[in-house]
Amino acid sequence: MSVANASPFAATGVPLLAPDGREQVVLVVKATFTLSPNDKLVIADDQIPVRLGDQPYRDDGIDSSILFPSDVGLAKRGVDILVVGEAVSSKPVRVLDVAAKIGKQTVSLRVHGERVYYRSGGKVAVGPAAPFERKAIVYENAYGGATADFQVIERRNPVGRGVCHHETDLIDTKAPSIEHPAEPITSAADKPSPVGFGAIATHWQPRSNFAGTFNETWRKTRLPLMPLDFDIRYWNIAHPTMQVDSLPVQTPIAVLGMRDGPVFRFDLPDLRITSFARTEDGKTLTLRPAVDTVLVVPGQNRVELVARAIFPMGRGKTSLREVRVTTDD
């Protein structure tokens, strides 16, 4: 099966099994835009290829958060919004609020400079923050983590900071520097929900919960298929607060505090793409790939939109021979 791409965007076809075992081809179309000075998105000269795997934040062999996620996957529920970059201030500050606004929905984060836990009277408190001008918005800087013996793990963010057996274990260690404004972290006793704008790995919660139940019954009756209680939300990669049910064309999106200069803002463009699948017997199936992922990189004036359409692989005369991608104009 080949993909003939007549659009200005990147596109590829990925064979994947549906949860019920049906063979499918997922057409992934990826559109890269740059933001013009008048807040208009223009098609980038260099289109970023479809990512077939996750790109980690750290590449040192240590468990890492995801910097840029894979574009491969089946249908999602709604749309994922991701923002990759740093909190940016024009002068040294100890705390800075950043926010992502998607339509009428706003998600805010409070970012502190580096701070450590210290003994304060009868408790372990969070010390004052050091000044900063740039701070990476990554899960390594948020609440979470695991103890050295892995007996205690924050499965929603196993790469973060603040998890411990005993609060005194945290003395002189780094405290979380990213938090929700309504859930400030002031001591080792504070254990808020991990927050962030980045992608959630497949083995983190809540994604791992949606994969289903891998028990003896599954091994005997379903392997290698997914469990019967598999939930398509497994394919959603954004933090739960950054998922929306729908994202109509022209929805305004804005990111505050994550680049030099004014607010990064744009209206969601219409990709106007159509895909045609042709089978061996000459029949054609037409689908319009739907955008289900928006990735914003404010520091690089870049927006990536990922749209996908799913075609049955078929067999014999109904087997898929070619998928063609075009734009409407």
Image (spheres, rainbow, N blue to C red):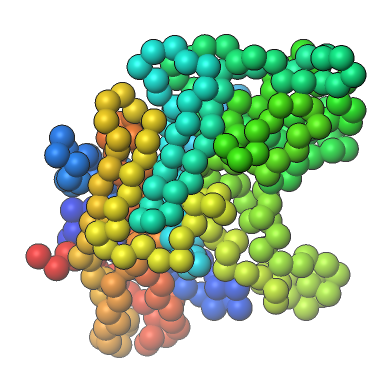
Residue 15 visible, this orientation:
no
Q: Is residue 199 above or below residue 137?
A: below
Q: Can residue 232 be spotted in the picture?
A: yes
Is 51 left or right of 38, judged from the image as shown? right
Give the quarter of the figure containing the C terminus.
bottom left
Q: In which quadrant of the rendered image does the N terminus lie?
A: bottom left
**57 or 146, nearer to the observer:** 146
Q: Quadrant of residue 323?
A: bottom left
Name the residue rendered at 47%, 73% in the picture: 24
Counting from the top left corner in percent of width and height, residue 120 is at 82, 14
Q: Position of residue 218 (x, y in %)?
A: 78, 72
Q: Is residue 21 left or right of residue 299?
A: right
Q: Which residue lies furthest to the left in this view?
A: 329
| Label total for image | 0
What residue appears at the point 33 percent right and 49 percent down from the top-left corner?
A: 253
User: What residue is at 53 percent from the left and 17 percent from the top?
Assistant: 94
Q: Position of residue 185 (x, y in %)?
A: 69, 30
Specify whether 96 is left or right of 8.
right
Judge by depth and name the residue closer to the eye, 172 or 128.
128
List x then y, in percent, for residue 205: 68, 52
Of residues 202 and 183, the one drawn nearer to the viewer in this rendering: 183
At horizontal 53% and vertical 45% (from top left) the residue drawn is 199
